[in-house]
């Protein structure tokens, strides 16, 4: 197994370092380089890993389930609602005041964007539930 040692300026690297361009005509020839970092429960220093994967590792082989289709539709609708609500100047002041009122409560959202996602998600669920 290969060992990865990063420069002292880099503490951790996690995620895809190189991705496969699925739209490219050469997608089958490309490789994805994925770096992972985990905090070991032991005193071992081998907590960094690099993986090289081809296109088959990132291409879905099973069809989408109805639950996944519904989740994707909900995400798309809520994302659009969040963007619309954030840009609506007539609601900004009221939204900021409501956000500040719930921010320090237990379970309160800590960012305005997270608050928008909570509110718009609840509205979507109420309409489609």
Image: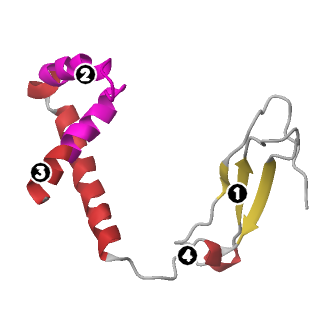
Q: Which residue is mark 2?
A: 102
**Contact (Cβ within 8 Å) of mark 2 with mark 1:** no
Q: Give residue 17's position: percent from left, percent from top.
A: 69, 52
Q: Give the Cα distance between marks 2 and 3.
A: 21 Å
Residue 106 visible somewhere in the drawing: yes
* Residue 49 vertical position relative to residue 96 in the rendered view, above or below: below
Predominant SS along the magenta part: helix
Which residue does the image show at 31% across and 62% down from the upper left? 71
Taking depth in this image into account, of 23 and 109 the one nearest to the observer is 109
Q: What is the secondary structure assignment of the residue under circle 4?
A: loop
Label 1: how many residues lie within 10 Å, few (<14), some (14-19) or many (20+)? some
**Contact (Cβ within 8 Å) of mark 4 with mark 1:** no
Q: Indicate which label's residue lies in the foreground, 3 or 4.
A: 3
Q: What is the secondary structure assignment of the residue under circle 1?
A: strand
In the drawing, does residue 19 fall left or right of residue 52? Answer: left
Q: Which mark is residue 87?
A: none
Q: Point out the tag, 2 or 1, that comes first from the N-terminus.
A: 1
Q: Point out the tag, 3 or 4, that comes first from the N-terminus.
A: 4
Q: Give residue 81's position: percent from left, percent from top.
A: 19, 45
Q: Give the Cα distance between marks 4 and 1.
A: 15 Å
């Amino acid at each position: 197994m290969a060992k990865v040692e990063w420069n002292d300026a880099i503490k951790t690297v996690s995620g895809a370092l190189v991705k496969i361009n699925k739209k490219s005509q050469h997608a089958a020839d490309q490789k994805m380089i994925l770096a992972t970092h985990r905090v070991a429960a032991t005193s071992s220093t081998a907590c960094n890993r690099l993986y090289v994967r081809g296109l088959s590792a990132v291409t879905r082989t099973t069809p989408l389930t109805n639950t996944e289709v519904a989740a994707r539709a909900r995400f798309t609708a809520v994302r659009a609602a969040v963007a619309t609500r954030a840009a609506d100047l007539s609601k900004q002041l009221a939204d900021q005041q409501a956000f500040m009122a719930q921010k320090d409560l237990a379970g309160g959202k800590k960012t305005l964007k997270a608050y928008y996602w909570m509110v718009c998600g609840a509205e979507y669920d109420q309409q489609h539930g």
